[in-house]
Amino acid sequence: MNFGPFVFIGVFCTMVISWWTFVFGPQVQIGGMQPGATVPAGDVYPVYRTGAQKRGAEVYRANNCAACHTQQVRPNNLGPDIARGWGMRQVASDTRGRYSVGEDYLYDYPVMLGTQRVGPDLANVGTRMDEKVVLYHLYDPRNKDLPGGIPASVMPPYPFLFKTQKIGRGPSPDALPVKVEAGYEVVPTDDGQALAAYVASLRQTAYIFEVPPPPSGKPMGMRSTNSAPTNTPAK
Ligand code: HEC
């Protein structure tokens, strides 16, 4: 018997079904997504990234930060991300969190969700670190004299995002507080500055229709039994 037509139909159906599920389905669901409004304030969300932040996203991509860092906070039923504090909303003394939704990435291309978590999730790192601390971390993640330094960190330093220059009339405002030869200072390059601007801009803190504020005062998704696991290496 000639099985050719069956094999053909089998392969064809497999292709069509996977295209339908993974390409067409998502396109119908989120392909035409528009910016929404925050709840309850009604501000437009998300907002565009600035030019520097966009450039920083390219630096992030070029250096493959996504090899070790994700940018997605999973809902409670899929993992302890919120309990770990990655979905935490640490602004205005409101520490309830939320998980990531498609709308958070509306203006990102490509979306650098990441698949491995050697380091912590960065979806909300902007609520934990400002540009300066991000720069310290990029310059020397293990330097405990710099804020945010972790001696046992396995994150590589990125010295090529910085340059050592002669101090001119006075020290630059963005010079890092590290010791180099007398008369010289370490400042971020344009790429370094842009990357820091991008990383410090990462925050998914707005409540929107899909992820409205949790009922009053309750920390969302904090587990009552286990203490929150942490990703920070022991000092
Ligand atoms: C080899 C894996 C690896 C790579 C590559 C890597 N990191 Fe990290 N990163 C880590 C680890 C591990 C930590 C946690 C320990 C620490 O804070 O240094 C971390 C921590 C961080 C933190 C602090 C997060 C927090 O919540 O405290 C930031 C910000 C960060 N990384 C940014 C970056 C950026 C930007 C890049 C790309 C230029 C990058 N990382 C590349 C492993 C990595």
Image (cartoon, rainbow, N blue to C red):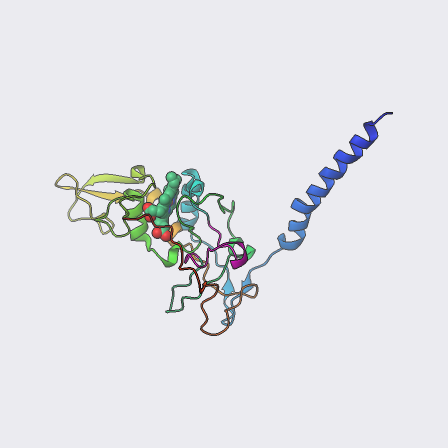
Q: Looking at the picture, how far across and down is residue 64, in whole percent?
A: 43, 39
The residue lying at 45 percent from left, 67 percent from top is: 219
Q: Is residue 19 visible?
A: yes
Q: Residue furthest right?
A: 1
Q: Is residue 9 left or right of residue 197?
A: right
Task: State which quadrant residue 87 falls in.
Answer: bottom left
Image quarter where the N terminus lies is: top right
Identify the magenta region: 71-86
Q: Looking at the picture, how far across and down is residue 65, in whole percent?
A: 41, 42
Residue 103: say if magenta: no
Between residues 82 and 157, which one lies in front from this camera angle?
A: 82
Residue 81: say if magenta: yes
Between residues 79 and 139, which one lies in front from this camera angle?
A: 79
Q: Is residue 157 above or below residue 135?
A: above
Q: Looking at the picture, how far across and down is residue 3, in whole percent?
A: 83, 27
Q: Looking at the picture, how far across and down is residue 127, in whole percent?
A: 38, 59
Q: Main secondary structure of the magenta part?
A: loop
Q: Is residue 139 above or below residue 35?
A: above
Q: Residue furthest left?
A: 182
Between residues 125 and 168, which one lies in front from this camera angle?
A: 125
Q: How many marks?
A: 0
Image-quarter location of ligand 1: top left
Q: Is residue 82 above or below residue 119?
A: below
Q: Is residue 193 visible?
A: no
Q: Is residue 158 left or right of residue 70?
A: left
Q: Residue furthest bottom?
A: 216
Task: State which quadrant residue 5 falls in.
Answer: top right
Q: Residue furthest top?
A: 1
Q: Is residue 111 left or right of residue 161?
A: right
